[in-house]
Image (cartoon, coloured by chain):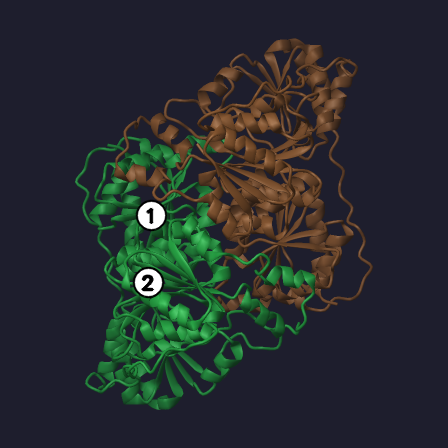
Chain colours: A green, B brown
């Protein structure tokens, strides 16, 4: 057996059994080894951003990493933007990047590049495999790091380490360090601070604290102390819907965010960062909390966030309290919007018709403004979203979620401009016959940038600004593009048409795309 | 005026008047400044790889850089693969990457990343702008570096350096260092070595040595000394066709390349590298010349390559010799191939019908095997190709060439697998109404990887290998994808159909795509 076989065995023994792939020549032995492992599910992406975006969506829903197979530095470069999003979501991921044989690097062949320099900014962990026998330990270590940090790991696999022989061995599962327990002293201090600041305190939450159980426990803390709970602006996954906490998030517009947080004198971080502006604007602050706000950390990424919340609730005597902020089910459908379509109507129709146990992949950008709020009272669902601002993750994210959860309906809320960055992902949706409804908000502009231009004082556009911010000449025909990649699709120009298409898409299995012209 | 205005002024005064762009929020002041400069041509790409691939194609044909506008680290990450190709072609390019305001970086907002670490492997020059007043000097220095190295430059533009005020100033053109003259001693030594090794010597050429004039002069040297001339495996641009040198290149398959070079005892580098295998294979050498081959450098990138060739010809008394290797015009058309279509027939038809003064953008990968050879005797044309092995450059390269040369027909020879990486570029072809015929070789596999799998001893594929190497389930419908992005398109399944469509496409203006099912 060779190093590539060992690689596959090490992944499989750790139950990493999905590999999103875009292979090249230096990975041929890895491909051949995967071909000897039918228990590994290999999913091809026609572009590397599809591969890592799918791995991100998969791990958010599966709670374990997928592997990716990427080709040399330039191939990984194409994957970086969605590795960046995964890094921000702290998604476990094991990227395997093929490189030239160790002895070939000296020749500076055309595809040679400094993979470590490229990988480091978008990875929590980078390791170059040194020998065929190093493959097993390296992949094991990457798996443990992906699960425990948690985060994005990148392992560089020289071709000769893949094709070189290894001694047969009984590969054993890798021990994963347990999430760190937050100290009792920290819990006591945070509890005391929460009691003191009461209604002027907030829990700032992300990561594994946004599952149903820890959110309900946090809501008991809120009920007991009077504090609020807020989600980070962007989060890897939130369990939502009626009967669960209706969690507000920090909004994108700086002024609205400042308003939301202006009365907070104590911010308790639960795996989260201090909220800051997504961008800087002249004359506006970077931090979204006021200067006098005390920031304290209950738990950091890699800590046992649910355990920390439980401990805090215990310290506060809150474990039996009735949770605050639980969403009531929506009233029975009072009729869907009608008439000319706009973004808000699309959101309302999706939120109203949302099926129980669905997964929402949200890259709606400016068009989905009202959507998150509208889904508070929808049937229970998972909400996963763009986390790092690197647009072009929506279509791949849906792929990964659908691979992880084949029995659940995945709904992609997709801005048109963003969707074009990884439009090739539609083919993978068709190839794998994934149960995904993609709703494209076809406003035919970079709408968010129109707002940002106004924010910098430009209200009238000349030719160059129009050329760079509008997508209307020619208009993209999403129906043809989708069909060209094997995905059934249709266009809606009224609310009635959209509702009918969306109901139809929910009633069938397999990928379907609706171009909502707004 | 602000730093962004100064940026535009500095580009324009240096005659950099095309900006391929994919903007985001941190570049809004740059967009606003571009909007005040109607003399700057702004071309939108819907994905950053389109932007840098187009800038590469533009500069190869215009002999001056375009600017690019990229958004933060993740946006530039999407641009890196084609920056890599441009780096290998040593194409002048000025990438302007917007970043957060200097004082905002400390907050680690979601889009923050280490741009320098990402940019360095794919750039010859990287500089972060420090202040608004630093914008002009930085852009000037980048321009000079792009032209003189020559190569890819990346300038990081913090938002506050774009929006901050600068003193009005009379911006002057930047002095560009002249290409270095090769020493007379080097010329004498190379001349002596060529005389000695005669027919067992070869000039290994690339860069600006592959224009008509220097190639003809090199061919005079060959006629005088008996040596050969060979192009690097991949080159930025070659002036070709009947009446010019029929330049052989180093072929991709290692065994064939070894055969080509086995009798070479003296290799003279003219801006080129020692030829090496594109990849390493077990048991095969990395360097493609034999161990006893003497390697000597006439000129390096950044040197005056045409001047060095002239000097060498002078030293050898070759300047009046009749050049060797000049291609005769092809015989009058003896009829085009007929019947079922295959890759070779497509190549033959294109080579036979090639219009005078056209520009070929070659990313045909395995399908174009015979094409380069077939074009030796075609009417004169420029040949630009994938240089760094980072597939997904063909469609953007054609955009850039067409923007640089609006009066010339651009013909994209495009493998289907590679084309999908930057398929969004078709929209830019439509938006700008560029005169491009894209020929898609629709073999519906990663054909080159089938060959590579055989090279590693795998002849029968299981399910996973098929899933990763074939693109046939479902087949991509290039006609629908192209039309969905506004590009007229049609499909050919026979040689007659292909010839008719290709003739039709040549007789009209504007973008057209032919899906050649092979």
**Disc 2: host chain:** A
Helix, strand, or loop for circle 1? helix
Quick one: B489 or A228, which is closer to the camera? B489
Q: In the rendering, at what x and y percent does residue A369 appear? A: 45, 74
Quick one: A378 or A49, which is closer to the camera? A378
**Disc 1: host chain:** A
Helix, strand, or loop for circle 2? helix
As drawn, is B457 to the left or to the right of B193? left
Q: CA distance from mark 1 to mark 2?
A: 18 Å
> In the displayed structure, would residue B381 be above or below residue B162?
above
Question: Is residue A302 visible to the viewer in this orientation of the structure?
Answer: no
Q: Residue at x 66, y 53 (%)?
A: B19
Quick one: A500 or A361, which is closer to the camera? A500
Q: Which mark is residue A475?
A: none
Question: Is residue B73 visible to the viewer in this orientation of the structure?
Answer: yes
- Residues packed near mark 2 inside 10 Å, few (<14), some (14 to 19) or many (20 plus): many
Residue that numbered label 2 is attached to: A505
Residue that numbered label 1 is attached to: A431
């Amino acid at each position: 057996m060779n190093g590539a076989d060992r690689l596959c065995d090490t992944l499989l023994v750790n139950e990493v059994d999905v590999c999103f792939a875009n292979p090249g020549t230096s990975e041929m032995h890895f491909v051949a080894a995967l071909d000897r492992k039918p228990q590994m599910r290999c999913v091809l992406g026609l572009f590397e951003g599809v591969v890592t975006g799918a791995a991100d969506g998969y791990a958010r829903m599966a709670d374990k990493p997928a592997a990716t197979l990427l080709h040399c530095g330039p191939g990984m470069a194409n994957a970086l933007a969605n590795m960046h999003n995964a890094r921000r979501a702290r998604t476990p991921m094991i990227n395997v990047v093929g490189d030239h044989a160790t002895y070939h690097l000296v020749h500076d062949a055309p595809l040679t590049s400094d993979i470590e320099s490229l990988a480091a900014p978008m990875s929590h962990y980078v390791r170059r495999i040194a020998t065929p026998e190093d493959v097993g330990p390296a992949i094991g270590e990457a798996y443990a790091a992906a699960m425990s940090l948690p985060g994005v790991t990148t392992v560089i696999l020289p071709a000769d380490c893949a094709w070189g022989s290894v001694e047969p061995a009984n590969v054993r599962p890798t021990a994963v360090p347990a999430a760190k327990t937050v100290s009792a002293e920290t819990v006591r201090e945070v509890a005391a601070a929460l009691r003191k600041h009461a209604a002027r305190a907030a829990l700032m939450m992300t990561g594994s604290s946004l599952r149903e159980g820890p959110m309900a426990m946090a809501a008991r803390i809120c009920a007991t102390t009077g504090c609020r709970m807020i989600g980070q602006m962007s989060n890897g996954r939130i369990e939502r819907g009626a009967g669960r906490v209706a969690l507000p998030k920090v909004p994108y517009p700086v002024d609205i965010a400042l308003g939301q947080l202006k009365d907070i004198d104590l911010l308790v971080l639960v795996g989260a960062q201090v909220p800051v502006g997504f961008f800087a604007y002249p004359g506006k602050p970077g931090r979204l909390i006021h200067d006098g706000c005390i920031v304290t950390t209950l738990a950091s990424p890699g800590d046992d966030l649910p355990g920390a919340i439980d401990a805090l609730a215990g310290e506060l005597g809150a474990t039996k309290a009735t949770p605050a902020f639980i969403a009531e089910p929506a009233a029975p459908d009072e009729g869907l919007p009608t008439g000319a379509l706009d973004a808000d109507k699309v959101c309302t129709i999706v939120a109203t018709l949302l099926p129980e146990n669905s997964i929402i992949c949200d890259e709606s950008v400016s068009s989905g403004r009202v959507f998150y709020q509208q889904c508070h009272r929808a049937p229970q669902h998972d909400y996963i979203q763009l986390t790092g601002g690197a647009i072009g993750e929506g279509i791949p994210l849906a792929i990964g979620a659908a691979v992880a959860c084949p029995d659940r309906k995945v709904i992609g809320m997709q801005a048109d401009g963003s969707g074009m960055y990884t439009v090739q992902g539609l083919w993978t949706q068709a190839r794998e016959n994934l149960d995904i409804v993609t709703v494209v908000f076809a406003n035919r502009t970079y709408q968010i940038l129109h707002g940002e231009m106004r924010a910098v004082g430009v209200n009238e556009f000349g030719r160059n600004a129009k050329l760079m911010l509008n997508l209307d000449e020619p208009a993209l025909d999403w129906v043809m593009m989708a069909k060209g990649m094997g995905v059934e699709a249709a266009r809606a120009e009224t609310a009635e048409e959209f509702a009918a298409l969306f109901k139809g898409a929910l009633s069938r299995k397999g990928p379907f795309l609706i171009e909502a012209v707004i």
